[in-house]
Image (tube, rainbow, N blue to C red):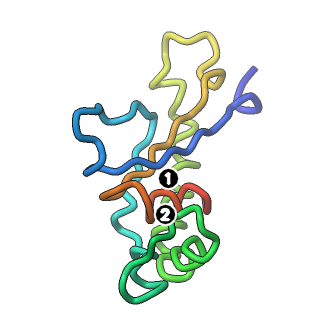
Amino acid sequence: MGKKNLVIHLMPFGLKAIGDNPVPRADLYLDCRSVVDPSWKATGKGSSGTGDSPLLQWEVKESSPVAITSFHRLIEATIPLLPMRRSGDKDPYEKPFVVACMCAHGIHRSRATKHIL
């Protein structure tokens, strides 16, 4: 019982891609619009690749180290707060801790950030 059982799920999503779909439920939302869009930096004109590409992930790591470090620290700081958020649960760490990485389209920045974290 306790933090040793905690599973963290990271999921990307796009604000413009939501349409009629609701914003996904999560314990923490990270706004990845603060990182450099790797699709533009990698090619200078946009890319058909996604944040699942190691090249685009490398671009995010190289271009936005402060944002990535801040996201990591925020996740670490939020985990101890789960008992307050899940006060009715027997073990607040039993259910996965869901982190939603969001950007405009959910294709480049949010996916790359998910993989890096």
* Residue under the point 64% across and 71% down: 54
* Label 2 environment density (alpha carbons within 10 Å; few <14, some 14–19, many ≥20): few
Asked if residue 84 is positioned above or below residue 21 in the image, the reply reads above
Asked if residue 19 is positioned above or below residue 39 in the image, the reply reads above
* Label 1 environment density (alpha carbons within 10 Å; few <14, some 14–19, many ≥20): few
Asked if residue 71 is positioned above or below residue 38 in the image, the reply reads above
**Which quadrant of the figure has residue 37?**
bottom left
Please tell me which residue lies in front, 108 or 102.
Answer: 108
How many numbered marks, from 0 up? 2
Q: Position of residue 11 (x, y in %)?
A: 51, 44
* Residue under the point 74% across and 28% down: 5
Q: Position of residue 68 (x, y in %)?
A: 52, 66
* Residue under the point 61% across and 58% down: 115
Query: Disc 1 marks which amino acid?
Result: Leu
Disc 2 is placed on an element classified as helix
Residue 70 - label: 2
Quadrant into which the C terminus falls: bottom right
Quadrant into which the N terminus falls: top right
The Cα atoms of the two marked residues, 1 and 2, are separated by 6 Å
Please tell me which residue lies in front, 84 or 14.
Answer: 14
Disc 1 is placed on an element classified as helix
Residue 74 - label: 1
**Which quadrant of the figure has residue 18?**
top left
* Residue under the point 29% across and 31% down: 22
Query: Disc 2 marks which amino acid?
Result: Ser
